[in-house]
Amino acid sequence: MIDVSLLPVALIGLMLTVLVERLLIPRPALRRPADCWMLHVGLWCVGFGLLYALTARPLFSGVNLLLLWVLIVLVSNSKYHSLREPFVCADFEYFSDAVKFPRLYLPFFGFGKAAVLAVGFLVYLWAGLRFEVPGARVEALLPVVIGLGLLRLGHRRVVPSFDAERDVRGWGLAASLWRYFWAARAPVDQAGLGSPFACEGSVRAAGAFAGKPAPTGDGDGLGSPVSCEGSVRAAGAFAGKPAPTGNGGGVGSPVDCEGSVRAAGAFAGKAAPTGNGLADLVSVQSESFFDVRGLWPGVRAEVLGEYDVLASQALARGKLQVAAWGANTVRTEFAYLTGIPSERLGVHRFNPYRVLARRGLPSIASRLKALGYRTVCIHPYDGGFYGRNKVLPALGFDEFIDVRAFNPSQKAGPFIGDCAVAQKIRELLEAPGRTQPLFIHAVTMENHGPLHLESVAEHELPAWFDRPLQPGMQDLAPYLRHIGNADRMLGMLRETLLSQPNEALLCFFGDHVPILPEVYQAVGAPAGDTDYLIWSNRRQPGSQACPIAVHKLSSALLAHAQAPAQGQAAHSAVAGVA
């Protein structure tokens, strides 16, 4: 039997937490503010005291807490390797997700590493409880009291930068987690978020189009939907002067209350049937999509042949500045649907679906629903993932279609294929007796990683590459296979929309670049931007490439959808003068 005292275990364990933190990437500075060290020591003392109160075994409690710390550091390093971001407080939720959806998480950590840790932990639990002599539980009071006092002293009203890497480097991991935890519980002023779809009275305006052409730029130079010449000069009810940013900055959303109320046209007023000129709108957030041909010259140009056809006819196209790298799809998804940039979200930028979106926020879906649209979201995966089954109705969707609407034969690899999603969109658009205009937002799943678990036969490679792959580039092959299916999806959507009796617009974009660390080591990493296009089945003028931020993309889609109404208004005005 092992008999140890409380104080030595607590002190040695605390020193070991500092040593373990030195393994963290990025490595925190040892010279950090005193209040950050107070939080580090305070969290250790409270955790150690509570475990000791439960088990009455100091060594068992100390080792358990230290193992948890080691696990967090290992997970953080795995995340940083794949996503260029350290562990943040919102990531604790992913521990339960890793149990529910192991394929999406454990391969990046390592199945072998996870198995060894799990078995070792179980053996340790048995040995610790079996061989260590229990002590007096009342002794737990001392570390808990000391820890609470240190937490109280270290709990200053310091606003994090919410640049996770910067905060971890400057404060250490424990202090960063603590401050992010409390920031997530602070009240949020939803009006201050500045969604372009929150304009009071923007859907009360009725009658004929009355607005003037929107300005061609908002002065930020960062890819506003109205910053490229001719891209959205006809903005109508969904554009106007730049909206306030909510933080005193000069860069605004392309959609503001004043402009959208002044412009009353086809997108404002009472619900109208599809025959009244409201275009059907389809947006596709394509998993891990970007123009991969710029990554390595060995990728065949025809891999994205359908994309090239649509891009050559597009109303708008170009690079898309997204809110995520390699994963965290919901960051891009939230920005697109709500029009809110991540900089305004504070700590909620890391997972806006966890708390913020569930409260209900104005979105493109809620705006279009108020105008008479039927709003549908398609995501061919478990509806509970990221809580989409709760979030999407709160954001204004009438219907959420998840994996239950598909069958296993529609898989392309581990997940439901993009072509199956295109077929589902076709079914919705061609439903007999449909009278409402449709807004369909699809979030695809086929190209979701981990790609290194998939294999490609040697004879398939010439379809995508015109030269042999370099060492370390094997994971690019399954990615190209799925990108090819995304391109086929575009061809199917083009055919479907061309057959529609009314105008229909397609907005297609990537949510983030893929996780391909070995490939990036071999040929270099992309900048992180993805690609987008906006295409109409009735107007195909072509356009120059224009970068845009993802939170402005949905407003750009609506501006382009309104453009014909503005053109009709201008024609009527000229006729009246004549």
Image: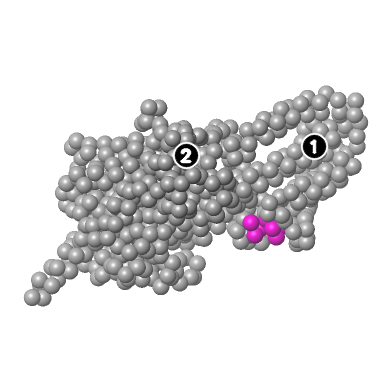
Image x and y of residue 484, in percent = 38, 42
Residue sticking out furthest to the front: 467
Q: Residues within 10 Å of mark 2 (few under 14, many from 20)?
A: many
- Report the residue that reaches farthest toward the bottom: 577
Of pointers 1 and 2, the one earlier in the residue sequence? 1
Disc assigned to residue 27 = none
Residue at left 44%, top 40%? 461
**Nearest to the observer: residue 381 or residue 531:** 531
Residue closer to the observer: 228 or 577: 228
Residue carrying label 1: 63
Q: Which of marks 1 and 2 is in front?
A: 2
Judge left or right: residue 290 versus residue 180. Answer: left
Q: Cβ–Cβ below 8 Å for labels 1 and 2?
A: no
At mark 2, the secondary structure is helix
Determine the CA span between mark 1 and mark 2: 42 Å
Name the kind of residue labelled 2 in the image: Pro
Where on the picture, by quarter, is residue 406?
top left
Compared across the picture, whether 475 is left or right of 231 comes to right
- At which x and y percent is residue 218? 38, 70
Q: What residue span does the magenta drawing correspond to?
A: 165-171
Q: How crowded is mark 1: few (under 14 residues within 10 Å), some or many (20 or more)?
A: some
Q: Say which element carries label 1.
A: helix
Asked if residue 432 is among those painted magenta in the image, a careful observer would answer no
Position of the N terminus, as image quadrant, is: top right
Q: Mark 2 points at which residue?
A: 478
The residue sitting at 37% across, 50% down in the picture is 301
Residue 223 position, x and y percent, is: 41, 65
Picture coordinates of residue 220 (x, y %)? 43, 70
Q: Which residue is drawn at 16% across and 52% down?
A: 276
